[in-house]
Amino acid sequence: MPHNVLLIDHLYHPAGEELLAQHSAVTHLEKPSRNQVIAAAKTAHGICGRYPNKIDAEVISAAEDLLVICSSGRGTDAIDIETATARGVTVVNNPGFGKVPVSEHAMFMLMSLSRHGIEHDSMTREGHGWSDRLGAGNTIRDLDRCTLGIVGFGEIGREVARKCAGAFDMTVIAYDPYVSSEEIAALGVEPVEHLPDLLARADYVTVHAELNETSHHLIDEAALRAMKPDACLINTARGKIVSQDALHRALAENWIRAAALDVFEIEPVGPDNPLCALPNILLSPHVGGLTQGFAEASSMSVANQMLTVFRGEYPENIRNPEAWERTKQRAMRILGVGA
């Protein structure tokens, strides 16, 4: 085999792994130790790690012949792009495939919170649902009278806005410092310049921002205290955007009514996580994007982009284009490809 691929945990679908195996020597590591990752990286030309596995400076430095790092999905916050660029290593991701499934998961969580799904399930199982249901119904608000606040107006945020405005006739407002007000307004959504203003107005806040230095703990104690007491928070983006400690206090002390999380500051989540003991939170194990369509498409994107780089050709979704010329030169030297 002309090139070696390291997969830290499996891709989301076997189709991509099968394609890679036809052209490369593939090494799989299942829940590896740090030392196992570094050892395996030494001979790798390409690495893909399932989130939250980190491909950091130490791993990249150990891989002397590394040409390309792929994220398993869209996010690249587990990859040290700065170090990769300095080493002449191309970083690629797989955007677009999660727009529909993640937006649908956010909608599922929105509807569950709106209809008090957690409480009603518990009431029914405990045998007092029928006697208490009329009183519970008095607390359910019609979504067409509610305002949805979207934090992060990229592909997924826009799809959630489209669904909520179209299907439920919700008032939709959005905050994103990287998107112009004109672009947000052009999609029929009201832009909000300052996050606290959005939090103060929204009945439901759904997070779809990328994780970076400015969005880390963007939803902190001050943000949660800015929300309405009967508002709900949804996060299907990245766990570290929301401070878990602050959210726990907000839910335990009723600063907000409820929350729904598909992502967490530390994953995987076990029963010792204090959020698991709260009655007013809906949890899922980072499955928002894991539909059949997403899994196969993203795994094939990983494989195809890796093989593209190994051929000395420019990949489709490069995150550090400034590294490409060095990557191409190194591919010629290491693999004897390109022109």
Image: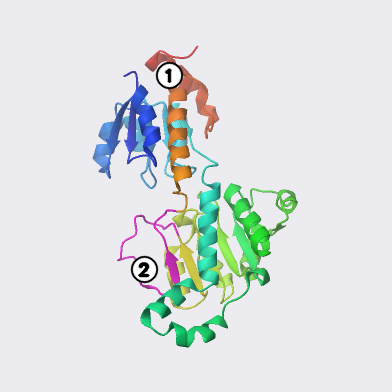
> In this figure, which residue is indicated by the disc labeled 1?
331
Q: Vertical placement of 101 versus 130: above or below?
A: above
Q: Position of residue 319 (x, y in %)?
A: 52, 35
Q: Which residues are magenta?
A: 262-287
Q: Position of residue 143 (x, y in %)?
A: 63, 69
Q: Position of residue 141 (x, y in %)?
A: 61, 75
Asked whether residue 6 appears in the rendered view, the answer is yes
Q: Position of residue 238 (x, y in %)?
A: 47, 53
- Front disc: 1 or 2: 2
Q: Mark 1: which secondary structure?
A: helix
Q: Which residue is depicted at the point 53% across and 40% down? A: 95
> In this figure, which residue is indicated by the disc labeled 2?
276
For the residues labelled 1 and 2, the Cα–Cα distance comes to 48 Å
Q: Which residue is depicted at the point 42% across and 33% down? A: 69
Q: Vertical placement of 201 versus 174: above or below?
A: below
Q: Is residue 185 left or right of residue 195?
A: right
Question: Viewer-proximal residue, 58 or 150?
Answer: 150
Q: Vertical placement of 223 versus 176: above or below?
A: below
Q: Amino acid at mark 2?
A: Cys
Q: Vertical placement of 302 versus 74: above or below?
A: above
